[in-house]
Each structure stands twice: as structure tokens, then as C-alpha cells.
Amino acid sequence: MAQFLAICRRVTERFTEDEFAPLMEPEAERARQLYTQGVVRAAWSRKDVPGAVLLLEAETQADAEGFVSTLPLKAKGMLEVDVIAIGPYRGFAPRGS
């Protein structure tokens, strides 16, 4: 299983808060479903812009992108998402003697 970060930003320049409002609970519900399925491992709200950052586990980048595409805001074109593959930080690896 590989890990990915999904950096999500609501497209506020094209959609109003009134358009986002009815989709926010379905969005949260879908994130909870993906968490229960072991796809979403952690989620954070962004403080710089409306959106979120999700830590995902999936077999491939395409799978991770596929999971993200099931979010209601993404499905309606109201969410921009960058999915980035991540791995262990080399600085934490054991040092040779």
C-alpha cells in the first residue's frame, strides 16, 4: 500500500457559499466512509484557503485519484485536488557507523 496527500481547495472564485452549503455534509459523510474503508488515514482543514488535506492509502496513484473523485464537491467540479505520492523521510533512516 502506498501513501498519498490530497491537497484540496474549494473553487470559491466560481461557486458561492450558498452553492457549497448543501454539499458540505455529504462531503463529510463520504470522507467518513473512506476513513472507515481504510483509504483516508487522516484529514485536516486548511487554514490558508477553504479546503482540506487528506492522507490517503491506496495501491496506486490512479486509485488514490479515483477515491478523491468520489467526493461530492470534486464530482461537481467545485474542488481542485492535487494528489501527491509520499514516502518515508530519508533523514529518519538509521545511520551507518
Image (cartoon, rainbow, N blue to C red):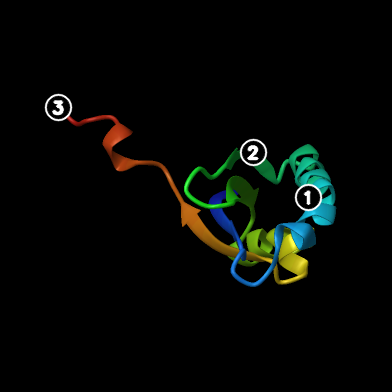
The x and y percentages for residue 79 are 65, 64
Establish if 18 lies above or below 35.
Answer: below
The x and y percentages for residue 87 are 44, 47
Residue visible at 22% across and 30% down? 95
Please tell me which of labels 1 and 2 falls first in the chain.
1
Please tell me which of labels 2 and 3 falls first in the chain.
2
Name which residue type carries label 3.
Ser
Q: Could you tell me which quadrant the C terminus lies in?
A: top left
Residue tagged 3: 97
Q: Which mark is residue 24?
A: 1
* Element on which disc 2 rests: strand
Please tell me which of labels 1 and 3 falls first in the chain.
1
Q: CA distance from mark 1 to mark 3?
A: 53 Å
Residue tagged 2: 41
Q: From this viewpoint, is residue 42 visible?
A: yes
Q: CA distance from mark 1 to mark 2?
A: 20 Å
Left-right relation of 9 to 16: left
Q: CA distance from mark 2 to mark 3?
A: 35 Å
